[in-house]
Amino acid sequence: MNIIVCIKQVPETTEVRINPETNTLIRDGVKSIINPFDMYAIEEAVRLKERFGGKVSVVTMGPPQAECALREAISMGADDGFLVCDRAFAGSDTWATSYTLAGAIRKIGVFDLIICGKQASDGDTAQVGPGIATHLDIPQVTYVKKIEEAGEKSMRVERMLEEGFEIIETPLPALITVVKEINDPRIPSLKGMMRAKSAKITMLGQKELNLNTTKIGLCGSPTQVVKIFTPPQRQGGQMLQGETAEAAKQLVGLIKDEVN
């Protein structure tokens, strides 16, 4: 089974700075990590390889420093890494990002399954995975918490819902996004870290991908951030005193006063 995992390098700190001119994240000088949800995607891909054989390729789109994320994925058991990196891709929204990653996946070659984390911790949109599936015109299943069966032509998964779960069977190739309930990511072994240190990372830029220039980067992004600002702190507020029943009566009284 040939598996491609899409990961993203995100800022480790919550103190994110914004470029006031482009309204995009400033990543220079900020320590970065693999998006936490993507760690579960890497682990699940490696487990599938261990069960069925095949290959795990990891791809990320970002600045040159994102190479570190690919090497960490290789240390966990992935076979190779692809860095989609070009100034032409800078400022991409989720649509342009998914379009660019889909182009990179076509360049990488034949695959049976694409795995993504359910969302990125810096954007929280959960749109890139489904966007990739749309651009590649393949089936997708989101919020997967368990892979029950996987064969050459199809797989059956358990998809998490707010009030339960559902079982879905999908033909392959397909794309899934996974949640943290699916596994516990492994700690890289010393052998894995040594292999990752010397692994070759393949760079893919606009020259290699030859994408439509009207669909990439900031100019090719239909989503435009007009303004970013910090909401003002809430003023006032009241702390209710007493036991639960008494506090509930106070709350009801306050709501009635507000309505009246």
Image: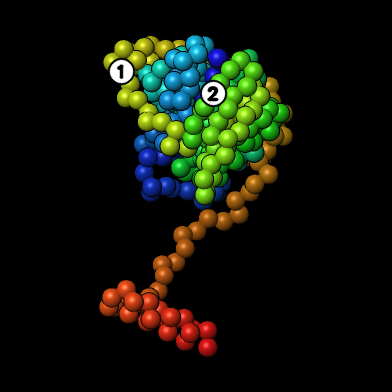
Q: Position of residue 37 (x, y in %)?
A: 45, 36
Of the residues shown, which amino acid type is indicated by label 1? Answer: Ser
> Can residue 82 be seen from the camera position used here?
no
Q: Evaluate if marks 2 and 1 touch, with contact meaning CB atoms under 8 Å apart.
A: no
- Say if 152 sits above or below 61 in the image: above
> Distance from label 2 to label 1 (Cα)?
28 Å
User: Residue at (47%, 29%) from the top-left corner?
Assistant: 41
Quarter-of-image position of residue 235:
bottom left
User: Residue at (53%, 34%) from the top-left corner?
Assistant: 158
In front here: 150 or 206?
150
Position of the N terminus, as image quadrant, is: top right
Quarter-of-image position of residue 190:
top left
Query: What secondary structure is found at the residue carrying circle 1?
Result: loop
Q: Position of residue 38 (x, y in %)?
A: 46, 32
Position of residue 36 in the picture relative to residue 55 (left or right): left
Residue 189 marker = 1
Q: What colour scheme governs how the chains and residues are painted in the rendered image of this protein?
A: rainbow
- Say if 162 sits above or below 114 in the image: below
User: Residue at (38%, 47%) from the top-left corner?
Assistant: 14
Quarter-of-image position of residue 114:
top right
Residue at mark 2: 149
Of the residues shown, which amino acid type is indicated by label 2? Answer: Glu
Query: What secondary structure is found at the residue carrying circle 2?
Result: strand
- Say if 28 sits above or below 229 in the image: above
> Can residue 146 be seen from the camera position used here?
yes
Q: Position of residue 94 (x, y in %)?
A: 60, 40
Position of residue 73 in the picture relative to residue 101 (left or right): left
The tag earlier along the polypeptide, 2 or 1, is: 2
User: Residue at (36%, 36%) from the top-left corner?
Assistant: 31
